[in-house]
Image: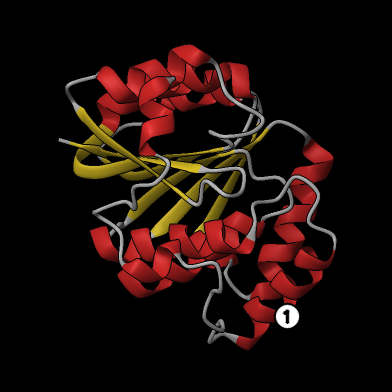
Amino acid sequence: MRALLSAVALLAASLPAAACAQAAPAVEDGRVAAVMAELEANRGMGVPRPDGQALKELVEEIGARRAVEIGTFRGYSGLWLALGLRKTGGTLTTYEIDPETAEVARRNFERAGVSDLVTIVVGDAHQEVTKLSGPIDLVFIDADKEGYLDYLEKLLPKVRKGGAIVAHNVRYPTPDPGFIRAIETDPRLSTTYINMDGPGLSVSRVR
Protein backbone atom coordinates (compact mmCIF):
# COMPACT_ATOMS: atom_id res chain seq x y z
CA MET A 1 0.00 0.00 0.00
CA ARG A 2 3.02 2.30 0.34
CA ALA A 3 3.11 2.63 -3.42
CA LEU A 4 -0.52 3.63 -3.44
CA LEU A 5 0.00 6.30 -0.83
CA SER A 6 3.06 7.64 -2.61
CA ALA A 7 1.04 7.90 -5.80
CA VAL A 8 -1.75 9.97 -4.32
CA ALA A 9 -0.01 13.20 -5.21
CA LEU A 10 0.48 12.17 -8.84
CA LEU A 11 -1.90 13.10 -11.61
CA ALA A 12 -2.57 10.52 -14.27
CA ALA A 13 -0.11 11.41 -16.99
CA SER A 14 -2.39 9.92 -19.58
CA LEU A 15 -5.34 12.12 -18.64
CA PRO A 16 -5.96 15.72 -19.59
CA ALA A 17 -5.69 18.12 -16.71
CA ALA A 18 -9.42 18.77 -16.86
CA ALA A 19 -10.11 15.19 -15.88
CA CYS A 20 -8.48 15.74 -12.52
CA ALA A 21 -10.16 19.03 -11.75
CA GLN A 22 -12.74 19.20 -9.01
CA ALA A 23 -15.08 21.42 -11.00
CA ALA A 24 -16.40 19.68 -14.10
CA PRO A 25 -17.40 21.71 -17.14
CA ALA A 26 -21.04 21.95 -18.03
CA VAL A 27 -22.55 19.04 -19.87
CA GLU A 28 -23.48 20.14 -23.37
CA ASP A 29 -26.39 17.76 -23.76
CA GLY A 30 -29.46 19.14 -22.01
CA ARG A 31 -31.26 15.82 -21.63
CA VAL A 32 -28.24 14.14 -20.09
CA ALA A 33 -27.61 17.14 -17.84
CA ALA A 34 -31.18 17.05 -16.52
CA VAL A 35 -30.96 13.38 -15.55
CA MET A 36 -27.51 13.89 -14.05
CA ALA A 37 -28.79 16.75 -11.90
CA GLU A 38 -31.51 14.50 -10.47
CA LEU A 39 -29.02 11.76 -9.67
CA GLU A 40 -26.51 14.18 -8.16
CA ALA A 41 -29.19 15.45 -5.76
CA ASN A 42 -29.38 11.95 -4.29
CA ARG A 43 -26.05 10.39 -5.23
CA GLY A 44 -26.00 7.41 -2.87
CA MET A 45 -23.39 4.97 -4.13
CA GLY A 46 -22.89 6.84 -7.40
CA VAL A 47 -19.51 8.31 -8.29
CA PRO A 48 -18.77 11.97 -7.53
CA ARG A 49 -19.05 14.35 -10.48
CA PRO A 50 -15.26 14.82 -10.88
CA ASP A 51 -14.86 11.06 -11.23
CA GLY A 52 -17.58 10.94 -13.86
CA GLN A 53 -15.91 13.75 -15.77
CA ALA A 54 -12.60 11.87 -15.60
CA LEU A 55 -14.25 8.82 -17.17
CA LYS A 56 -15.62 10.91 -20.04
CA GLU A 57 -12.25 12.54 -20.66
CA LEU A 58 -10.46 9.19 -20.67
CA VAL A 59 -12.94 7.68 -23.13
CA GLU A 60 -12.31 10.59 -25.48
CA GLU A 61 -8.55 10.60 -25.02
CA ILE A 62 -8.03 6.92 -25.86
CA GLY A 63 -10.71 6.95 -28.55
CA ALA A 64 -12.65 4.16 -26.84
CA ARG A 65 -15.22 2.49 -29.06
CA ARG A 66 -16.04 -0.40 -26.75
CA ALA A 67 -16.43 0.23 -23.02
CA VAL A 68 -17.45 -2.14 -20.23
CA GLU A 69 -18.78 -1.08 -16.82
CA ILE A 70 -19.06 -3.38 -13.81
CA GLY A 71 -21.72 -1.97 -11.49
CA THR A 72 -24.39 0.06 -13.26
CA PHE A 73 -26.28 1.25 -10.17
CA ARG A 74 -28.68 3.98 -11.36
CA GLY A 75 -26.64 4.85 -14.42
CA TYR A 76 -24.82 8.03 -13.37
CA SER A 77 -21.31 6.90 -14.28
CA GLY A 78 -22.77 5.25 -17.37
CA LEU A 79 -24.12 8.62 -18.49
CA TRP A 80 -20.63 10.13 -18.31
CA LEU A 81 -19.21 7.18 -20.23
CA ALA A 82 -21.98 7.54 -22.81
CA LEU A 83 -21.17 11.23 -23.32
CA GLY A 84 -17.61 10.30 -24.21
CA LEU A 85 -18.70 7.35 -26.34
CA ARG A 86 -21.10 9.55 -28.26
CA LYS A 87 -18.07 11.54 -29.45
CA THR A 88 -15.96 8.48 -30.27
CA GLY A 89 -18.77 6.53 -31.91
CA GLY A 90 -18.61 3.81 -29.28
CA THR A 91 -20.94 1.78 -27.11
CA LEU A 92 -21.17 0.72 -23.47
CA THR A 93 -21.98 -2.69 -21.99
CA THR A 94 -22.81 -2.32 -18.30
CA TYR A 95 -23.44 -5.05 -15.74
CA GLU A 96 -25.87 -4.85 -12.82
CA ILE A 97 -26.72 -7.74 -10.50
CA ASP A 98 -30.01 -6.35 -9.19
CA PRO A 99 -32.92 -6.37 -11.68
CA GLU A 100 -34.81 -3.50 -10.02
CA THR A 101 -31.74 -1.27 -9.99
CA ALA A 102 -31.04 -2.20 -13.61
CA GLU A 103 -34.56 -1.09 -14.54
CA VAL A 104 -34.01 2.27 -12.86
CA ALA A 105 -30.80 2.70 -14.85
CA ARG A 106 -32.53 1.68 -18.08
CA ARG A 107 -35.16 4.38 -17.59
CA ASN A 108 -32.47 6.96 -16.83
CA PHE A 109 -30.58 6.09 -20.01
CA GLU A 110 -33.79 6.39 -22.00
CA ARG A 111 -34.69 9.75 -20.47
CA ALA A 112 -31.18 11.02 -21.17
CA GLY A 113 -31.37 9.93 -24.80
CA VAL A 114 -28.41 7.55 -24.71
CA SER A 115 -30.15 4.16 -24.59
CA ASP A 116 -28.99 3.46 -28.15
CA LEU A 117 -25.41 3.50 -26.85
CA VAL A 118 -25.92 1.35 -23.76
CA THR A 119 -26.58 -2.37 -23.26
CA ILE A 120 -27.48 -3.41 -19.70
CA VAL A 121 -26.69 -6.99 -18.73
CA VAL A 122 -28.54 -8.17 -15.62
CA GLY A 123 -26.75 -10.87 -13.66
CA ASP A 124 -23.58 -11.73 -11.78
CA ALA A 125 -20.80 -9.94 -13.63
CA HIS A 126 -18.23 -12.43 -12.34
CA GLN A 127 -19.91 -14.99 -14.56
CA GLU A 128 -21.29 -12.75 -17.31
CA VAL A 129 -17.99 -11.10 -18.28
CA THR A 130 -16.56 -14.46 -19.24
CA LYS A 131 -18.90 -14.31 -22.25
CA LEU A 132 -17.24 -11.14 -23.54
CA SER A 133 -14.79 -11.27 -26.40
CA GLY A 134 -12.05 -8.74 -27.01
CA PRO A 135 -10.78 -6.30 -27.81
CA ILE A 136 -12.17 -3.94 -25.18
CA ASP A 137 -10.96 -0.35 -25.01
CA LEU A 138 -11.97 0.66 -21.48
CA VAL A 139 -13.19 -1.12 -18.36
CA PHE A 140 -14.68 0.69 -15.36
CA ILE A 141 -15.02 -1.35 -12.15
CA ASP A 142 -17.31 -0.06 -9.41
CA ALA A 143 -18.99 -3.08 -7.83
CA ASP A 144 -18.24 -5.53 -4.99
CA LYS A 145 -14.87 -4.44 -3.66
CA GLU A 146 -13.76 -7.94 -2.73
CA GLY A 147 -14.34 -8.96 -6.33
CA TYR A 148 -12.08 -6.39 -8.01
CA LEU A 149 -9.17 -8.80 -8.44
CA ASP A 150 -11.40 -11.40 -10.09
CA TYR A 151 -12.75 -8.81 -12.52
CA LEU A 152 -9.21 -7.70 -13.32
CA GLU A 153 -8.00 -11.24 -13.98
CA LYS A 154 -10.95 -12.00 -16.26
CA LEU A 155 -10.97 -8.74 -18.21
CA LEU A 156 -7.32 -7.71 -18.54
CA PRO A 157 -6.59 -10.28 -21.27
CA LYS A 158 -9.46 -8.81 -23.29
CA VAL A 159 -8.32 -5.16 -23.12
CA ARG A 160 -6.27 -3.89 -26.03
CA LYS A 161 -2.84 -2.35 -25.70
CA GLY A 162 -3.30 1.33 -25.00
CA GLY A 163 -6.65 0.65 -23.38
CA ALA A 164 -7.46 1.28 -19.75
CA ILE A 165 -8.90 -0.38 -16.66
CA VAL A 166 -10.32 2.13 -14.20
CA ALA A 167 -11.41 1.24 -10.68
CA HIS A 168 -13.44 3.31 -8.24
CA ASN A 169 -13.10 3.45 -4.43
CA VAL A 170 -9.38 2.76 -4.29
CA ARG A 171 -9.13 5.10 -1.30
CA TYR A 172 -12.38 4.23 0.47
CA PRO A 173 -14.00 1.80 0.87
CA THR A 174 -10.83 0.04 -0.19
CA PRO A 175 -10.92 -2.98 -2.51
CA ASP A 176 -9.12 -6.26 -2.00
CA PRO A 177 -5.44 -5.46 -1.26
CA GLY A 178 -4.61 -8.11 -3.84
CA PHE A 179 -6.17 -5.92 -6.51
CA ILE A 180 -4.03 -2.93 -5.52
CA ARG A 181 -0.94 -5.12 -5.52
CA ALA A 182 -1.83 -6.50 -8.95
CA ILE A 183 -2.37 -3.15 -10.67
CA GLU A 184 0.87 -1.81 -9.20
CA THR A 185 3.10 -4.79 -9.97
CA ASP A 186 1.69 -6.42 -13.12
CA PRO A 187 4.17 -5.59 -15.91
CA ARG A 188 1.29 -5.35 -18.39
CA LEU A 189 -0.08 -2.29 -16.57
CA SER A 190 0.99 1.26 -15.83
CA THR A 191 -1.12 2.58 -12.95
CA THR A 192 -1.68 6.05 -11.59
CA TYR A 193 -4.22 7.47 -9.13
CA ILE A 194 -6.45 10.52 -9.43
CA ASN A 195 -9.09 12.34 -7.37
CA MET A 196 -7.70 10.83 -4.18
CA ASP A 197 -9.27 13.55 -2.05
CA GLY A 198 -12.50 11.60 -2.62
CA PRO A 199 -13.16 7.87 -3.01
CA GLY A 200 -10.32 7.73 -5.52
CA LEU A 201 -9.80 6.30 -8.99
CA SER A 202 -7.03 4.05 -10.25
CA VAL A 203 -6.24 4.36 -13.94
CA SER A 204 -4.31 1.38 -15.28
CA ARG A 205 -3.17 1.70 -18.87
CA VAL A 206 -2.42 -1.54 -20.70
CA ARG A 207 1.09 -1.65 -22.11
Would residue 138 be visible to someone looking at this image?
yes
Determine whether the residue tagged by mark 1 lies in a helix, strand or loop. Answer: helix
Q: Residue at x 36, y 74 (%)?
A: 87
Residue 148 left/right relative to 49: left
Residue 1 left/right relative to 119: left
Q: Quadrant of residue 163?
A: top left
Task: Write down the residue under mark 1.
Answer: 34
Residue 114 in picture, x, y percent from top left: 57, 69
Q: Residue at x 55, y 44 (%)?
A: 94
Mark 1 is surrounded, within 10 Å at the Cα level, by few (under 14), some (14 to 19) or many (20 or more) other residues, namely some
Residue 136 in picture, x, y percent from top left: 30, 41
Q: Quadrant of residue 85?
A: bottom left
Q: Nearer the viewer, residue 123 or 188?
A: 188
Q: Quadrant of residue 77?
A: bottom right
Name the colour scheme: secondary structure
In this picture, is 30 found above or below 67? below
Q: Nearer the viewer, residue 53 or 158?
A: 53
In this picture, is 156 found above or below 34? above
Identify the amino acid type marked 1: Ala
Q: Nearer the viewer, residue 12 or 107?
A: 12
